[in-house]
Structures are given as C-alpha cells and as structure tokens.
Image (tube, grey):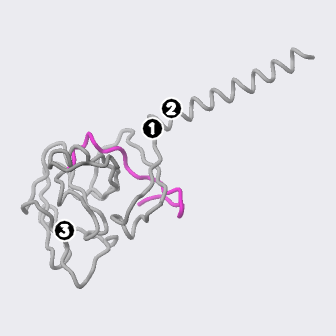
Amino acid sequence: MKKSILKEIYEWIETFLVALLAVILVFTFVMKFVTVSGDSMRETFHNGDRLLISSLNYTPERGDVVVVDVTHNLDELGYVSKGAPYIKRVIATEGETVNIDAVNWRVYVDGVALDEPYVFHLNAENMRRGDIEYPYTVPEGHVFVMGDNRNGSSDSRMIGAIDERYILGKVFFRLLPNTGVIK
C-alpha cells in the first residue's frame, strides 16, 4: 500500500514538472506577455492592457500591431534608451514609400491613402510629421511603424524605420482588461 501511494505521488510530481517545463518553453520561445505603458496606441490599447505576443513564423505585414525593441534606434540617435519596448502599428514594409499629409491626417503608402479608422486625432492640430524627409522609402529588412495616437506617439517618424530583427512579436490577444482577439 505504501508503494502505491509513493508511486502515485511520484506520478503527480512528474506530471506537474512536465507541465511546468512545457509552459516555460511555450512562454520562452513561442509567446510572451507584455503590458501596455502609455497612450501611444489610444484608442486601440490602453495603459495597463495585458497582451499576448508571438514571433513564431512571423513576417511583418501592413496593419499588424507589433512590439518592437527600439533601443538600437535610440542609441543611434544619441538618446539614452530606457529599454522598454514600444507597441506600434506596421504602416509600411521594406521598399514601400511613406508620405504624410499632416493637415488632413492622412498617411500614404506607395501613393495610396491608408484606411485608418483606428487613429486617434485632434481636429484642431496637424499630425506630427517627425524629423524625417518625405516621401520616405523603407529600407530593406525594416518596417515603418506608427502609434494610433499620432500626436502622442514616438515612432518611425522620429526614430526611423525599425529593423525587422528587433520585432519582438505580433500582438494577437488582449488578456486584460478587455479580453479579445486583435484584428
């Protein structure tokens, strides 16, 4: 009887350790949790939202919401980076040309105005254009990203295109406070 109890305890511990290892592997290599800090993606995401991201077999596409490591861009510009990743929307990918009409709050990619119902804008102000020269062609292996809160976001308009190697993952699920799949 003692052997069967010890055997059952051993099996429970073994099952728990295998499950724990599987969870650790999934959250190390397949997906990660991130927390939104700030208003740069207002109205899409809010400060404190908990998101699930994944980079598994990911190729950036226009419209994707991604989390990026911008420390390399900030270092090149001479800024002291805080190391916090940015959450932004992919506006254009390599080889595409971006132009901004700040007065009418329009972003053009390859001459076509983007349909951006998610953008938060202020009617009394022009959209910030940033420090780069337009039209701007996205370099090979890079993406041009912008926050949905255009005048409350530091993004590619200020820090340049983001190397695709520094995309930490695409947002695919919001856990808290509002649960839902990201479109």
Q: CA distance from mark 1 to mark 2?
A: 8 Å
Q: In the rendering, at what x and y percent does residue 45 appear?
A: 42, 64
Q: CA distance from mark 3 to mark 2?
A: 40 Å
Report which residue position mark 3 lands on.
107
**Towards the viewer: 50 or 138:** 50
The kind of residue on which mark 2 rests is Leu
Which sits in the foreground, 124 or 25?
124
Q: Is residue 180 magenta?
A: yes
Name, please, the residue furthest toward the front: 80
- Work out whether mark 1 precedes mark 3 in sequence or the reverse, and give the earlier one: 1
What residue would you read off at disc 2? 25
Q: Residue furthest bottom?
A: 124
Q: For mark 1, what is the residue?
A: 30
Residue drawn 31% across and 69% down? 149
- Residue 144 lies in quadrant: bottom left
**Of marks 3 and 2, the one in the foreground:** 2
5 relative position to 51: left or right:
right
User: Do the residues bearing badges 1 and 2 touch, measured as CB atoms within 8 Å?
Assistant: yes
Label 1 SS: loop
**For marks 3 and 2 on the same chain, the one whose residue lies earlier in the sequence:** 2
Q: Residue 5, how many percent across, how many down?
A: 86, 21
Q: In the rendered view, tell whether residue 107 sits above or below residue 19.
A: below
Q: Which residues are magenta?
A: 162-183
Q: Secondary structure at mark 3?
A: strand
